[in-house]
Image (spheres, rainbow, N blue to C red):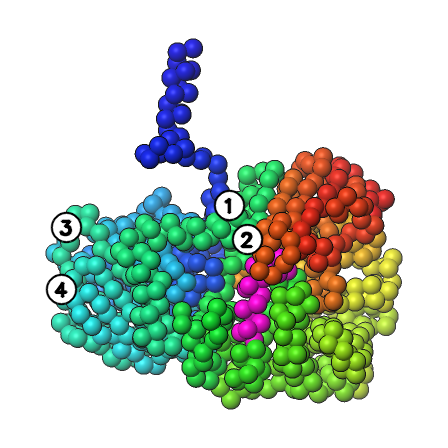
Amino acid sequence: MKKISLLLLISLISSISSSGQAVSTQKEPVDYVDCFIGTSNSRWMLGPYAQLPFGMVQIGPDNQGNRWMGGYEYAINSISGFSHIHAWTMGGLMMMPTTADLAISNPGPDAPYKGANAGYHSRILKETEKAFPGYYEVELYDHKVKASMTASTRCSFQRYVYPKASESRIMIDLHFPTEWDYGFTVEDAVISMVNDKEIEGYAKCKSGAWSSWNDWTLFFVIKLDKPIETFNGWHNGHISENIKDIKGNNDIGAFVTFTTAEGEEVLIQTGLSLVSIEGARKNLNEEIEIPFGWNFDAAVTNARKVWNDLLGKVKVEGGTEINKTKFYTNLYRSFSGKQTWNDVDGRYRDACEEIQQLAEGQSVYGGDAFWNSYWNLNGLWSLITPKIMDNWVTTQLEMYRHTGWTSKGPAGIEYSGIMEGSHEIALMVAAYQKGIRKDGEAIYEAVRKMVFNPGGSHPCGGNYGQLNLGYYTKLGYMPREVDVVSKTLDYAYDDYCVAQLAKALHRKKDAAVLEKRAMNYRNVFHPDQKYVCRRDSLGNWDPEFDIFSNQGFIEGNSWQYSWYVPHDVPGLLDLIGRDKAKQRLKDGFRKSEEHNFAAHIFDRTMGQSAEFYINHGNEVNMSAAYIFNYLGEPALCQQYTREILDRYYGATPYHGWEGDEDEGQMGAWFVMTAIGLFEMNGGVTANSEFDITTPLFEKITISLDGDYYPGNKFTIETKNYSGENKYIQAAYLNGKRLKRPEILFSDIVKGGTLILEAGDKPNDKAF
């Protein structure tokens, strides 16, 4: 009894902080995030980087050298250095603390670590590698340095703990291993020592051959808390010592040296800008120097709090710990793939590299394509962070006003031309229909231009708009000799989106034209096969049609694309035939179970003959399970959405997503489905609806943004909750029973409660 009492006393004492306040041992949302999930076989944009939501800075480890999908690979126990930018088609500014023999090269992980051919990379002690949102640390075995780092939106803050050494260094590399995904070149650069504690410079960069439309100048200011003893540099393999600056292109960098005592900490603060060196200095001053001074731990605490506040907008209760880890990690990824490209003062460079000025409180973002983001990210951002939706519209309207067009994928505020349709339209229209934006006329002017004027090559680089639009409007489909047939489906959806805004603004003539064009998807459904099929400009169908070939389709095949009509699912099912559609979809899911619903595409013309059905690992198939709701089979929707959550998504470095995570798209689908919601048509109608499935948790509480929505909180509760009870028996919104498995967006943002009664068997009378 005395022993038990002593243990209780020790436990009580350990729960009291030094200030006498009780310390909560309950995990917070940020504590569930595992930054290493899915980081094996991941792309450049996904790693255990220290960053804030939509951070310009994503500082963290690189270790793969020159290779496609290079960046960070969890299975490799070495690090080349810590680079600051991990954006799609963009990179820049690697830093690395070193103490071993001087080396200026940066070879791959299989290169020697000592000797004549060694680079400055280092092996790591894997057990010392730690990360949580906004923070990363590791011990560099070959340099005997512990490196820790955190970030603000536009700046990094690093702490290097050195051994006793007569020459400790910091390497500053502007042209590190460059074949990550697309690579880049440095066309011109300067690194200068301002004084013994400050360095500044810039690197004028251009992305690789495929993505050469993306060029940017990265300006930086670096400050240290320890005086520099020598400033040195290299260019094309030649080292220059005790200099004031170094200039050149491509292989260019600098290194500083100083003497360190055992365990001595050196702090480094770095501000970035795509506008100017003064912009970088101002970013650093306002985001790091003023709020934190040289208090590294305070900056770490701030980053953690920013993430916890964001993740805490959705509180989940019940369910397993592993599902909470998957949930909050996927929620984290939904905000860690895109970047903010304006400075703190609102200045940014447009696609023609001209400096523009935003109104106070606005931001411009960049990233990969909006291709089908209306099925995942748009809905999530609308619900919990409408300000992000607001800023995305600002980004697109800024591009339209200053450089003529909106952008499908505005990496670096450029015209990537990726992907096929102009699905930024869906985001812009939804933002207006949901009340996030009020400037419907301005939005309409921009999106109308996209669907009534053909796209082309932008004079400042890249492609804009709907390429080959004239063929589509003339024939009612995209002929096979001109472009892929799948463009017909993308363009038809874009037409539908603009038509909805036209109706909302009483543009009846435009609405009629575009709603008719939105039905063009019917023109590429083979009348006998009932699958999407290529046809030529004379109307002839593909004589070698194969539903599993990807010829004529972008990252998909006919079987998969034949479900891809988000704006007219009932019409699609009638076209196929409802009984046939139901059986086809059932068979597809059953045959895809062995692939964890990630049936990756192979081209039969290249010798593969596998029959691939559901591919949740790419955008065009992410609605498939929810189509069961439209077939009168909501129980099958509930069954297969749960199976995808359980099987496609994992919780280890080696299994996070069965495919490309795509800058938050896979993560946002998990989050939305885990709370039981899915937006089939992208939320572009006047009264947009969410489809309903069984949530992954017993209770979900969504905190609503009072600056945009009238409600305070919306709660989703599952009665009779258990892992086996995945079938909805009845649903009630604010006490009123629902007759269909759907709920209005407007009902959610008013606040209220959705109660779902669950059971272990399907109930065909649930709705």
Determine contact: label 1, label 2, CB under 8 Å. yes
- The residue wearing badge 2 is 331
Residue at left offset 74%, top offset 39%: 758
**Is residue 530 covered in magenta?**
no
Mark number displayed over residue 298:
none
Q: Which of marks 3 and 2 is nearer the N terminus?
A: 3
- The residue wearing badge 4 is 229
Q: Distance between the residues labelled 4 and 2?
A: 45 Å
Tag 4 secondary structure: loop
**Residue 571: horizontal and vertical position, in percent?**
83, 66
Residue at left offset 65%, top offset 49%: 714
Query: Is residue 592 or residue 261 the one in the foreground?
Result: 261
Q: How far apart are marks 1 and 2 (CA)?
A: 10 Å
Please provide the residue range marked out in magenta. Answer: 379-396
From the viewer's perspective, tell me whether residue 592 is left or right of residue 243.
Answer: right
Q: Assess disc 4: are there few (<14), some (14-19) or many (≥20) residues with their C-alpha within 10 Å of its C-alpha.
A: some
- The residue wearing badge 3 is 261
Determine contact: label 3, label 1, CB under 8 Å. no
